[in-house]
Image (cartoon, grey):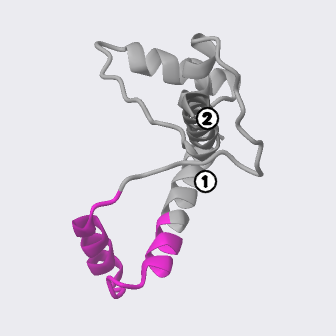
Amino acid sequence: MVQKKDKDKSKKGSAWTEGSKTGMKAIQEAFMLSGDMPDVIRSEAYREGLSASDMCRKILDLPIETKKTGGRRLTISLKPEDYVALSERWCIPVDARPLIRSKMRQELEAFYYKKEEQKR
């Protein structure tokens, strides 16, 4: 009987371990670096065509698994009050998030095209 219990425990342990390997998602780590360290890393990432996260992975000699897409992704964190401010600015209902998102994209693209025009 003792052998069977030990055997059952090892099965449970291995099942938990296997489950945790497949079920665990990535954990985001954030670092507050001093001075211009973050800017240097971001600049180098830009020069190499990498995201800042991928550049950190490269520096740490970790595999870079970013899937190439049609464009590089930009992210922004918005609080509920940010949605209110944008909805008021564009006279859009605050709950029309897809429309707010579309207007945000338009403004980001307009910024880019303006900067490109200034280069000429």
Q: Residue at x 54, y 29 (%)?
A: 2
> Which element carries disc 2, helix, strand or loop?
helix
Horizontal arrangement in the rendering, residue 96 relative to residue 84 (left or right): right
Residue linked to disc 1: 113
Tag of residue 4: 2
> Which sits in the foreground, 68 or 12?
12
Residue 67 placement, left or right of 78 = right
Q: Amino acid at mark 1?
A: Tyr
Picture quarter containing residue 88?
bottom left
- The disc, 1 or 2, on the residue closer to the chain's N-terminal end is 2
Side (left or right) of 112 relative to 88: right
Residue 8 x/y as whole percent: 59, 38
Q: Position of residue 58 (x, y in %)?
A: 64, 16
Q: Tag 1, which secondary structure?
A: helix
Residue type at mark 2? Answer: Lys
Q: Which residues are magenta?
A: 78-104
